[in-house]
Image: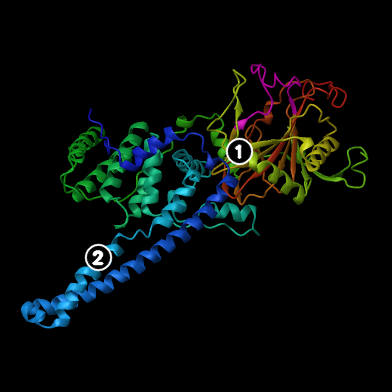
């Protein structure tokens, strides 16, 4: 069977992309938004430098144009009667002058390097540029957001990404706008998907690139190139969907349009014959006629969930979108337990005059929100201490116990110890005061900033029985409880969701979410499986305090029931 393969010879840009991936594997700018802020300032400086270069080039060109107009005028005059022209001594003098002074001066102007300063500035900061890995990661982040929040390519391309969700979550917050994408931008997203053999997203973005295509003298992108990718991606999606007729038709129509633009395209001609035979077989009809009307409709592409398998993928994404399946509706008898109150933890001395605003947000598993538990100045100090140390977040391998990077956790984190600053000590003490649990065996305060599409897919904070090496080196037992501080509001997305029970926590600056990971018996509570939804628009800062079992024996005593 003949299988079409567009662009067998990869474009130079794509080859460089592959080479760059091997050469630079540690630059992970896209994994934390705070690490991308310097790029804005650096680009402004480069734009200013480029503007100066353009001005110098324009000045240089204007000088050349001026001398050219003079040369042209005198050359025209002399060319009419050359011999007579030279009879005049001034003309003879000026001719000699032009060859000894003006033409050498013109040569010097043309050879003048006005780009030196700009190239110097560019070279000086080039080491700080994002890598090709960042480019790939940023592209995949956009695709992840598109899937998780069920966004159309049209809306993303029009700059309408997450606007409705942002208004619903934070109606008073000004929405961050983005420009519309050019056809070439859409094409590049589609090509990244193609390289990753993700033909579903490749087809979606090639369709958008085609819809937005306009000839551009500054771009090498051509319409037939887009159609070549689109035809192949549509065909691959058709294969994966066990024969959705619309997509083999779309591959056929795209190839047909390609041949109208470039009739000598050999591969497209062969593909055309192949598609005609496939369509004839699927419809059990004669080969499509050449005069058949051309379709301009987009293909009907369906996402392949098996490609990125996650058991609770559908529920997880619905909760991220703030849509809760009906079977998660909480009954009135359960709702009555969810209350707000001022909390002093049985007249704790440090809480008597400053009780905490406590809201029970869920009943099973029990989850609480401490509103305004952190002050703005405390959060500022924590971010300031953490930012220079942020490194890409890791997960613990359940088999080896080793820390490693994972595509399902995109963020950067740092760890802060109590001795480093009085604010860290004060926050640790506050956690102990409100929870009644000792911080002596708790982990250091982990600070996290999420990057482009930053997320953490469903996971447990505690170690399950088969994870025998988890936390072994700490010698403090399992993680009994989690305190999660939100240190920023998020315009859209970024919720913490619990797919097993349908709970959803929206980031609220200064608030702390608390829940127990283990029952009093020490068994893990499987209902606490949770995820950090991708940040759609905004920057998400959180910090975690993971509290361990050791030392809690008399603070959280065993219960009478396994479910306590």
The answer to which image quadrant residue 62 occupies is bottom left
Q: Residue at x 70, y 19 (%)?
A: 473
Give percent across and percent down for residue 413: 64, 37
Q: Which residue is mark 2?
A: 104
Across the whole image, how many numbered discs are drawn on residues? 2
User: Which of the two residues, 522 or 13, is positioned nearer the viewer here?
Assistant: 13
The answer to which image quadrant residue 77 occupies is bottom left
Whether residue 170 sits left or right of residue 296 in the image: it is right
Q: Residue at x 30, y 41 (%)?
A: 11
Q: Residues within 10 Å of mark 1 (few under 14, many from 20)?
A: many
Whether residue 421 sits left or right of residue 82 in the image: it is right
Q: Secondary structure at mark 2?
A: helix
Residue 475 to residue 370: above or below: above
Q: Residue at x 40, y 34 (%)?
A: 196
Asked whether the viewer can see residue 496, the reply is no
Q: Secondary structure at mark 1?
A: strand
Quote the CA–CA distance across marks 2 and 1. Answer: 58 Å
């Amino acid at each position: 069977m003949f299988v079409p393969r567009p662009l067998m010879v990869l474009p130079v840009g794509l080859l460089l992309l592959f080479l760059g991936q091997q050469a630079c594997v540690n630059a992970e700018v896209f994994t934390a938004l705070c690490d991308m802020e310097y790029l804005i300032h650096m680009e402004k400086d480069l734009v200013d430098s480029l503007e100066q270069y353009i001005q110098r080039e324009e000045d240089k060109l204007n000088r050349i144009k001026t001398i050219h107009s003079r040369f042209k005028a005198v050359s025209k005059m002399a060319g009419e009667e050359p011999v007579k022209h030279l009879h005049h001594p001034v003309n003879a003098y000026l001719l000699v002058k032009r060859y000894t002074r003006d033409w050498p001066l013109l040569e010097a102007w043309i050879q003048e390097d006005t780009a030196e300063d700009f190239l110097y500035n560019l070279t000086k900061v080039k080491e700080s540029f994002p890598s090709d890995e960042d480019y790939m990661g940023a592209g995949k982040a956009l695709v992840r957001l598109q899937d998780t929040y069920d966004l159309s390519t049209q809306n993303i391309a029009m700059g309408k990404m997450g606007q409705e969700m942002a208004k619903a979550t934070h109606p008073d917050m000004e929405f961050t706008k983005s420009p519309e994408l050019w056809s070439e931008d859409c094409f590049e997203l589609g090509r990244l998907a193609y390289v990753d053999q993700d033909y579903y997203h490749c087809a979606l973005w090639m369709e958008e690139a085609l819809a937005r295509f306009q000839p551009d003298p500054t771009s090498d992108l051509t319409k037939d190139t887009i159609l070549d990718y689109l035809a192949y991606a549509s065909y691959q999606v058709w294969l994966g969907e066990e024969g959705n007729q619309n997509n083999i038709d779309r591959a056929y129509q795209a190839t047909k349009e390609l041949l109208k633009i470039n009739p000598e395209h050999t591969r497209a001609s062969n593909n055309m014959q192949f598609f005609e035979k496939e369509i004839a077989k699927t419809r059990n009809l004669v080969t499509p006629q050449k005069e058949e009307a051309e379709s301009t409709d987009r293909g009907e592409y369906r996402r392949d969930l098996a490609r990125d398998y996650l058991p609770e993928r559908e529920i997880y994404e619905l909760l991220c979108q703030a849509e809760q399946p009906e079977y998660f509706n909480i009954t009135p008898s359960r709702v009555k337990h969810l209350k707000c109150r001022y909390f002093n933890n049985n007249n704790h001395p440090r809480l008597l005059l400053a009780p905490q605003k406590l809201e029970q947000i869920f009943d099973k598993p029990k989850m609480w929100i401490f509103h305004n538990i952190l002050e703005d100045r405390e959060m500022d100090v924590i971010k300031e201490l953490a930012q220079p140390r942020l490194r890409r977040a890791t997960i613990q391998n359940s088999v080896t116990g080793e820390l490693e990077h994972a595509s399902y956790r995109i963020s950067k984190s740092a760890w802060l110890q109590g001795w480093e600053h009085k604010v860290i000590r004060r926050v640790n003490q506050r956690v102990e005061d409100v929870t009644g649990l000792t911080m002596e065996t708790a982990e250091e305060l982990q600070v996290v900033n999420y990057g482009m599409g930053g997320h953490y897919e469903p996971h447990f904070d505690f170690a399950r029985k088969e994870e025998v090496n988890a936390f072994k080196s700490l010698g403090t037992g399992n993680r009994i409880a989690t305190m999660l501080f939100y240190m920023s509001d998020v315009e859209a997305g970024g919720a913490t969701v619990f797919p097993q029970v349908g709970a959803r926590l929206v980031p609220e600056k200064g608030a702390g979410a608390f829940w127990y990971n283990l029952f009093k018996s020490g068994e893990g509570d499987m209902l606490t499986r949770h995820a950090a939804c991708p940040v759609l628009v905004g920057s998400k800062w959180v910090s975690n305090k993971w509290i361990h079992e050791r030392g809690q024996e008399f603070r959280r005593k065993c219960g009478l029931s396994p479910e306590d």
